[in-house]
Image (cartoon, rainbow, N blue to C red):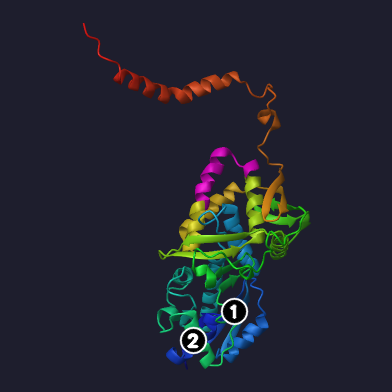
Amino acid sequence: MAEKVVLAYSGGLDTSIIIPWLKENYAYDVIAMVGDVGQGDDIEAVVEKAYKTGASKVVVEDMREEFLTGYVFPALRAGAVYEHKYLLGTSLARPVIAKHQVEVALREGATAVAHGCTGKGNDQVRFELAYQALAPELKVIAPWREWTLKSREDCLDYAEKRGISVTASREKIHSRDRNLWHISHEGGELEDAGNAPLPSTWQLTRSPQEAPDREERVVIGFEKGTPVSVNGMKLDPVSLVELLNEIGGRNAIGRIDLVENRFVGIKSRGCYETPGGTLLIAAHRELEALCLERDLMHFKQHIGLKYAELAYFGLWFTPLREALDAFVDNTQQDITGTTTLALYKGNVSVVSRQSENSLYRTDLSSFTMGESYDQKDAEGFIRILGLPSRSRARLRADAVKPEVTR
């Protein structure tokens, strides 16, 4: 009986040719695992294609809600943004896909797992670190690090020779990854950092020129840092993100063009569209500004940077990430309320933030002087704070005094 390998299968160019390649080079029975993270594919067509290209079995796993509640929303609560721009759409999807892939492998008695990531990218690290954390006994096969194919054109040639239909073409050469949180675009004209993205590159969002000529307002509600409603409607996680993607997309929200530092040391350029995520990040930040104590809020910014780095580097299944989640969960206990945003041609403006846990007090912030704040206290406060500065200034003054001659 042949050994089994479970392939993380999308039906795209790379994984479409990996099934026959595995059969030709390893003589494995290939189990294709199709992970639905909201990429919008025709799942039945993907399954049919996997069988046509040689899969002995296809397993479909619906991960959409788990992806949001277990990976995306924790990153949202942490304020995780990589290198100021990237909202980690691909980074957060890889660990949940790898987790299910390992579960399928163990359930099916497979001895190996495989992925379609190149040897230059971050995703190989994300998948394989997850495999090692969850099932280190499984063999890992990474065809891109073994075969003689060097480019997407080579892959297209390989597919054509074996009669494999793929959506990629020599004219439409972008590599895209889509899920509920975002879509990424790489390759093609984007490989030159000096080129502007083509209008046809963008998929989820309108351009500012095509967006409505009127402002649209959206009210996002949170409970303990987790988004739960849009415009007063309680929604399940998947419906909520889908609705915000629609709202943000039609208002040209969520486009970024990023030159980023990959974990493997290469600078790469990609374009990302995260319309709903951009709205959620903005709304969540405003609610935290209202409800978090100053020192906690400032320290949490450091945590957000580290959290983003861990997710981007593929270090999801680690004690550090779990510990950071515990910290973040504690900070979110009072982050309940609503933020109203105004959207207009790619711009997001904050209209209002409201929470019963607000630390904002008009009697303190107002320019009107009242009994709740004694201005005279500020003098001693400033004198104490300035003590080191005064001491240093006196020392410097004594050092430059001219010597007195008699």
Q: Is residue 110 visible?
A: no
Q: Residue at x 68, y 51 (%)?
A: 348
For label 1, the residue is 34
**Which of 108/289 is in front?**
289
Ranked by sequence position, the earlier of labels 1 and 2 is 2
Give the residues in magenta.
289-304
**Which of 171/140 is in front?**
171
Residue 238 belongs to the span the image colors magenta: no
**Which of 232/260 is in front?**
260
Q: Residue at x 65, y 37 (%)?
A: 359
Query: Residue lying farthest left?
Result: 406
Q: Quadrant of residue 129?
A: bottom left
The C terminus - image quarter: top left
Could you tell me residue 79's position as x and y percent? 57, 52
Could you tell me residue 151's position as x and y percent? 46, 80
* Helix, strand or loop under label 2: strand
For label 2, the residue is 4
Q: Quadrant of residue 363?
A: top right
Q: Residue at x 36, y 19 (%)?
A: 394
Residue 301 belongs to the span the image colors magenta: yes
In the displayed structure, would residue 406 be above or below residue 296? above
In this rendering, the label closer to the viewer, 1 or 2: 1
Q: Residue at x 60, y 82 (%)?
A: 167
